[in-house]
């Protein structure tokens, strides 16, 4: 196992899964995330909302070190997963991303079969001992992503042969196949029609029974429907963070109120 594995007793049962402290992100001279501190709880859907360019996606990508792949990007501050610094030199980003999975805005299945898309992570991480165990993992992930019934008779077909909504659920299956503890979703429904959106939202609600979900969304209706906690970002700052109901009905900061009432953004 990797360095990130912690003994059970170290896990705070008050369920703080991720703790970010004073996170700053720069792309060259652009200061995209300014001193953001937040606690993400386990088995909760947390929505990141805010006007375009306010740093939501950048901050989301810090949570599984996806920004490592952007050359100009510098991340400062501390991000702890179960109390462990994910930016510690000993942490392997590939192992980290198995624990903190990600689903992107545009469905991005690999140019492989439906089966191989889902089997990809378990293969990299050696999560099975036999073909039948791998078959079980693939089936379980596809069931969890609510797409098994639609693909079970065509597992050898290319992932790209599915509809957009199906591809997004396939990508969710791929992300959950490695048994992540946190799932990051960056506008996962923006390329989907209302029916596929409803399916993915239903799925998000089911997924949070098992782990923590963090979703960036431009849709305040979606944030209100799927999340229990909401973080409002503005100009790189985290302006307000709290219970979703409170943020939408009784925000404390005038900037949050302006955004949710449509005056900024
Ligand atoms: N790869 C990059 N290189 C340089 N600057 C970037 C990069 N990605 C984002 N930025 C800049 O960082 C700031 C925050 O962008 P980010 O994409 O995080 O915002 P966002 O709130 O997710 O926006 P949107 O809602 O439009 O997706 C913006 O000023 C953006 O131009």
Image: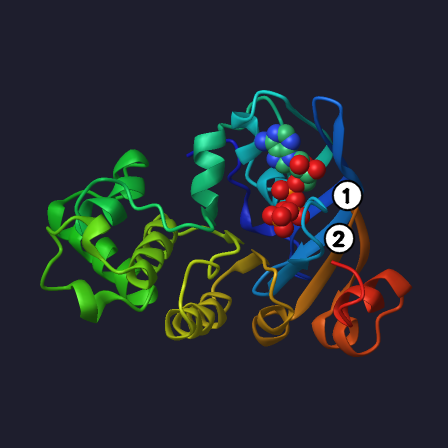
**Residue at screen point 46% across, 48% down:** 104
Q: Is residue 130 left or right of residue 263?
A: left
**Residue at screen point 21% across, 60% down:** 139
Count neighbours of disc 1 (C-alpha within 10 A) and say few if under 14, some if 14 to 19, many if 20 or more. many
Q: Is mark 1 within 8 Å of ligand 1?
A: yes
* Quadrant placement of the C terminus: bottom right
SS under mark 1: loop
Q: Nearer the viewer, residue 175 or 11?
A: 175
- Number of the label disc, if any, that sits on residue 58: none
Question: In the picture, residue 151 is in which quadrant?
Answer: bottom left
The residue beneath circle 2 is 233
**Marks 2 and 1, how far apart in space?**
6 Å
Residue 68 position, x and y percent, is: 56, 27
Q: Is mark 2 within 8 Å of ligand 1?
A: yes
- Number of the label disc, if any, that sits on residue 236: 1
Count neighbours of disc 2 (C-alpha within 10 A) and say few if under 14, some if 14 to 19, many if 20 or more. many
208 shown above or below 180: below
Question: In the picture, residue 261 is in which quadrant?
Answer: bottom right
Residue 210 position, x and y percent, is: 47, 64
Question: In the picture, residue 140 is in which quadrant?
Answer: bottom left
Q: Is residue 187 left or right of residue 78?
A: left
Q: Is residue 10 visible?
A: no
- Ligand 1: image quarter: top right
192 shown above or below 73: below
**Residue at screen point 70% across, 47% down:** 19
Q: Nearer the viewer, residue 47 or 207?
A: 47
Q: Is residue 233 left or right of residue 142?
A: right
| Disc 2 to disc 1: CB gap under 8 Å | yes
Residue 115 position, x and y percent, is: 18, 50
Residue 227 position, x and y percent, is: 61, 69
């Amino acid at each position: 196992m990797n360095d990130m594995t912690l003994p059970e007793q170290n896990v705070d049962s008050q369920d703080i899964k991720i703790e970010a402290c004073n996170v700053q992100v720069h792309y060259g001279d652009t200061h995209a995330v300014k001193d953001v501190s937040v606690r993400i709880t386990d088995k909760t859907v947390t929505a990141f909302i805010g006007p375009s360019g306010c740093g939501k996606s950048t901050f989301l990508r810090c949570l599984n070190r996806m920004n490592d792949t952007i050359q100009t990007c510098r991340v400062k501050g501390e991000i702890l997963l179960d109390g462990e610094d994910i930016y510690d030199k000993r942490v392997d980003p590939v192992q980290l991303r198995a624990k903190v999975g990600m689903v992107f805005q545009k469905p991005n299945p690999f140019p492989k079969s439906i089966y191989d898309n889902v089997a990809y992570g378990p293969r990299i991480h050696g999560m099975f001992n036999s073909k039948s165990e791998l078959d079980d993992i693939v089936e379980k992930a596809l069931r969890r992503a609510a797409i098994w019934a639609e693909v079970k008779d065509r597992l050898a077909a290319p992932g790209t042969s599915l509809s957009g909504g199906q591809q997004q659920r396939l990508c969710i299956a791929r992300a959950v196949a490695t048994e992540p503890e946190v799932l990051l979703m960056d506008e996962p429904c923006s390329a989907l029609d209302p029916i596929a959106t409803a399916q993915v939202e239903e799925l998000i609600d089911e997924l949070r029974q098992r782990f923590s979900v963090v979703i960036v969304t431009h849709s305040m209706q979606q944030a209100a429907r799927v999340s229990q906690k909401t973080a409002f970002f503005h100009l790189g700052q985290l302006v307000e963070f709290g219970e979703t109901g409170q943020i939408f009905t009784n925000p404390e900061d005038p900037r949050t109120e302006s955004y949710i009432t449509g005056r900024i953004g």
